[in-house]
Image (cartoon, coloured by chain):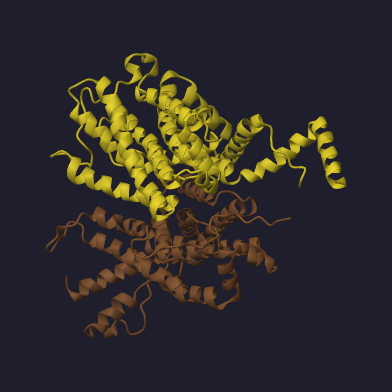
Amino acid sequence: MSARRPLPHWADVALLPVLNLLLALLISGIVIALIGQNPFDALRILVYGAFGYGEGLGFTLHFATDFVFTGLAMAFAAHAGLFNIGAEGQAYVAGLGAILVGLTLDHTSWLLVLPLAIIASSALGAFWAFIPGYLQAKRGSHVVITTIMFNFIASALMIYLLNYVLKPAGVQEPSSANVVAAGKIPQLRQFFPFFGYAPLNMTSIFAVLALIFSYVVIWHTKLGFAMRVMGLNPTASRYAGTSNSRLIMIVMAISGGFAGMLAVNEVLGVQSRIVMDFTSGYGFVGIAVALMGRNHPVGIALAAILFGALYQGGLELQFEMPAVTRDMIVVIQALVIMFTGAMEGLLRPGLENAFILFRPERKAEAVKRETVGTEG
Amino acid sequence: MGFEDIISLLAATVRLTTPLLLACLAGLFSERSGIFDIGLEGKMLAGAFGAAAVAAVTGNMWLGLLAAIALSVFMAMLHAVASITLKGNQIISGVAINFLAQGLTAVLGLAWFHQGGRTPPPPPGGRFPSITLPWADQIHGVPIIGPIYAVLISGHNLLVYIAFLAVPVTWWVLYRTRFGLRLRAVGENPKAVDTAGISVYRLRYQALLVTGVLCGFAGAYFSIAQGSGFVNNMTAGDGYIALAALIFAKWKPVPAMFATLLFGFLDALQIRLQGVPLPIIGPIPVQFIQALPYILTCVLLAGFIGKAVGPKAGGVPYTKEN
């Protein structure tokens, strides 16, 4: 056992996630074969649907934008040792901020609406995450459980607001009024016909900014340092003079703020109004994205594009192979979460051994170290 | 609201409480052994699908129940391998299991039955019928006691009675057997259990086995007892309510029954109150009642009304030292 050596860095951050992804795809392929379809055809359709033409690519990047936000929400909290499972609810509530800015400033310009909507929705998302943060910091309730509860509370709250407050008179389904002018965030297809009908819009710029922002905050600020210390060892962090409870609340608020931005992308970028469940489970995809992306902004960007491709390709697949619905993507997502998150121990030891075995000089070194160890 | 209405509201409460209670007791075994389990929802859903699929094909409710238990136990063992053997993160594993069940049941349901993810209603014999207890019809006319016996106590299906019977059984297992003592110990201090020469891993696997079986019962209840056939995502968050109830009950079996009865009652009330104005307060938005279990749980967790402290070793994988 003592011969176990940590993996080389590149294998840890790239090879292992890729192997776990392949394992997830392999099992999904078996499921597709079990229901009588050809998994290779499915993969071909999926990849073409996601990247093969402009509109597909536009959809892929649009979904990726959502997943960057929720992936960052998850990852940012994870660096501080917090498990924010409530991105879904935070984004849902944040929809209020997006639509209120959109409706109020509908007569102005999108240049005003976009930044203000981002601020308003992330403020609401932050608020919805701050409460569980406060409850953990000051009252000791576990943030995992409270964020789950807050997802359901958010859902009930939003259904109430959509039905009794936001719904304009004469409208049947529970939804808000439509933004018609400046409240609509311009979609890139207005400038590049290449994107067909894809809803990719200007909010994606903020996804890139959010990635850069999180990188700077996590690795190049005092706050980032303090939160990483707390994540690794809360006792040491307190000993070093950090107020852990204050830090928990700040980190949860920022995490919820990231999740909140999703609302702008969906509410003002696509729907032009709030509809029920516009978050469609994207908050939970963030869990897979953060795990797959190793909580690093670059990894999250790549993982978000991967999941964007799975979601868009999955839609295409549903057209071409009606037996393989989008639920298949949920299966892949579940397997990715399982293998990269919970069953990491499945491949890692084997991979570590492989690295020792297939590199003679490492093996010799390992043997030497072992021998020295036993002599000493 | 007359007496008969109250009785029928309470009878609905019992019916809605049953899956919550089974899932809550399932979670109790897992969490008391030190394994967080937010995958109750997924296990129930898998069970519901298994029961519906097998009962629809064979027309046999017992085979359906068996299939539900088998699938749910499979999911529980997945959780066990991830969180006990591989020492993975139990929360993440639970999340994965919920999604796996949600996705797989939808994909397989569509592929096998071609009804948009539904399974056909099971043929006669494929569903747990309601049981009329002896003399229920005869004494229905007796004031007060009659309706209580005939409507509230009699007339449910077998799984309802099993769920409520599982409460004293769980209590007995937990507090009066060697297994229960060890189970409680392993959730508080696994090292002490290990030092006493008892395998922590084995105990936790056993606990998750029980969790799987109980979730299987709950799943079967959804699709071949209360309902008739499987519908996508038919557990509709009950696994999370059960989790909330478990915290509310402070991880104890008898309080678990009262907590799930309370949440079941809120659910029944919410269905009954759709659009009905109450005296003084006026119409209450049903969404508020729907959110109440979650709000109450948060309030409780925050220590505003009592304090909920879970098993001490919960969520920490056990590593035996060399």
In this rendering, the count of numbered labels is 0
Q: Which chain is yellow?
A: A
Q: In which quarter of the image is residue B313?
A: bottom right
Residue B142 seen in this snapshot: yes
Q: Which chain is brown?
A: B
Q: In this view, does B144 lie above or below B215?
A: below
Q: Nearer the viewer, residue B269 or B187?
A: B187
Q: Position of residue A167 (x, y in %)?
A: 18, 40
Residue A324 seen in this snapshot: no
Q: Position of residue B11 (x, y in %)?
A: 30, 71
Q: Which of A214 and B285 is in front in this view?
A: A214
Q: In which quarter of the image is residue B278?
A: bottom left
Q: Position of residue A61 (x, y in %)?
A: 43, 25
Q: Is residue B168 left or right of residue A13?
A: left
Q: Which residue is found at the position 84% from the left and 34% from the top?
A: A364
Q: Which of A310 and A366 is in front in this view?
A: A366
Q: Is residue B238 above or below residue B5?
A: above
Q: Where is residue A343 in the image (x, y as percent from the top left)?
A: 60, 46
Q: Which residue is found at the position 51% from the left and 30% from the top?
A: A219
Q: Which of B253 and B96 is in front in this view?
A: B253
Q: Is residue B235 left or right of residue B26?
A: left
Q: Which residue is found at the position 27% from the left and 20% from the top?
A: A111
